[in-house]
Amino acid sequence: MPTKIEKDSLTGTETTGHEWDGVRELNNPLPKWWLYTFYACIAFAAVWVVIYPAFPFQGATGVSGWIAREAVVRDVREADARMAPIMARIRAATPQQIAADSEMRGFAVAGGRIAFANNCAGCHGAGGQGAAGGFPSLADDDWIWGGTHDAIRSTIAHGVRAGESDEERISMMPRFLADGVLTRAQVSDTAEFVLSLSGRADDMTAAQRGAALYAENCAACHGDAGAGNRDVGAPNLADRIWLYGGDKAAIIQTIAYSRAGVMPSWRGRLDPAVVNMLTVYVHALGGGEN
C-alpha cells in the first residue's frame, strides 16, 4: 500500500512511496544511456513514418514513395523475366528431353522441389515418402499407375478421380460387402487369400475358400497372382507395400467398402513448365522408371 515518500536511510535514495511486506521500493533514476537510446528511437520513428508508409491509410506511401508490395511484385517480375528463356524451353520439351539435358534437368529439379513443397508435400510428405490414409510414396518403385516420365506427368496433369479432367485416372473398386456382392464371411476369406499372396496368411483353410472368391471377383483387375495392373490402377497385392494398410482388418475394410482417394488435376492450376518440372523431380526421387 502507498506510504509516505522518504529517503532510504542506507542509500540516501528517495523511495517511491510503495511498500510490500515491509520492503520499500527505491526510486532509482534510469541509466542515462538507456534514456538517450529511448529518445533516439522516438526521433528515428518520427523520421521513419514520414519517409516510409507507416500508417494504414489507403494510398499512403511516405515521401520516399516506396511500397513493400510493389517492390515484391517488381522483384517477381524481374525474376520471371530472367527465367523466361529456360522456362520456355522446359514448357516446350518433354520430361524425357528435360531429363536428358543437364541444364534443363538441374533447373527442373530445383524448381520442381519448390513446386512439390508448395503443392504436393502436404499429402505425399516433404520427401515424397507418402502417408497413411491413401497418400502413396513417390520415392519407392511401387507405382499404381506407372513410374515412367509419361505416366507420372499424366497423373500430375490430370489427377485421380477428381472429376476435373476427361483424361484423369479413374479406377473404381466395387464395395463387395456394402453392395451385397459378398457376405462378411466371404470378405474375410478373400482377405485371408490376399494375405497368402505375400506369405502372411494365418488360416490356410480360409485362404483356400477365398481363392475361388478372389478368382471370381478380383483377378480380372489384380491378376491371378495379385501382381496388379497399372492400366486400370489396380495395385500389386503380392508385395508388402500397402496404401491403406496391409493387416487383415485394413484389407477387409478395403474389400468391404472400397477406397477412392482423390488427387486434383494440376494442369489447370500450374504452368505446363511447372508440371514438367514436377514430373522430372518426382521421377528423380528414387522410384522413377525408364
Image (cartoon, rainbow, N blue to C red):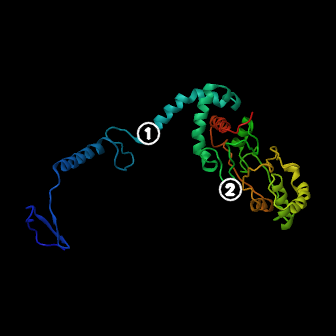
Q: How far is disc 1 from disc 2 in space, using C-alphas?
A: 42 Å
Who is closer to the viewer here, 191 or 282?
191
Q: Residue 59 appears in which quarter of the rendering? A: top left
Is 186 placed above or below 167 here?
A: below
Q: Identity of the amino acid at label 1? A: Glu
Q: Determine crowd level at label 1: few under 14, some 14-19, many 20+ residues with C-alpha closer than 10 A.
A: few
| Residue 87 appearing in the image | no
Tell me if 13 is positioned left or right of 226 in this view: left
Could you tell me residue 261's position as x and y percent? 72, 53
Is 75 placed above or below 163 here?
A: above
Residue drawn 41% across the image and 41% down it:
68
Residue drawn 59% across the image and 45% down it:
126
Tell me if 275 is positioned left or right of 214 in this view: left
Could you tell me residue 204's position as x and y percent? 86, 60
Q: Identity of the amino acid at label 2? A: Gly
The mark tally for this picture is: 2
Q: Determine crowd level at label 2: few under 14, some 14-19, many 20+ residues with C-alpha closer than 10 A.
A: few
Q: Secondary structure at mark 2?
A: loop
Who is closer to the viewer here, 182 or 129?
129
Q: Say which residue label 2 marks.
A: 133
Q: Secondary structure at mark 1?
A: helix
Tell me if 227 is positioned left or right of 63 in this view: right
| Residue 137 appearing in the image | yes
Mark linked to residue 70: 1
Could you tell me residue 53's position as x and y percent? 35, 44
Who is closer to the viewer here, 62 or 35?
35
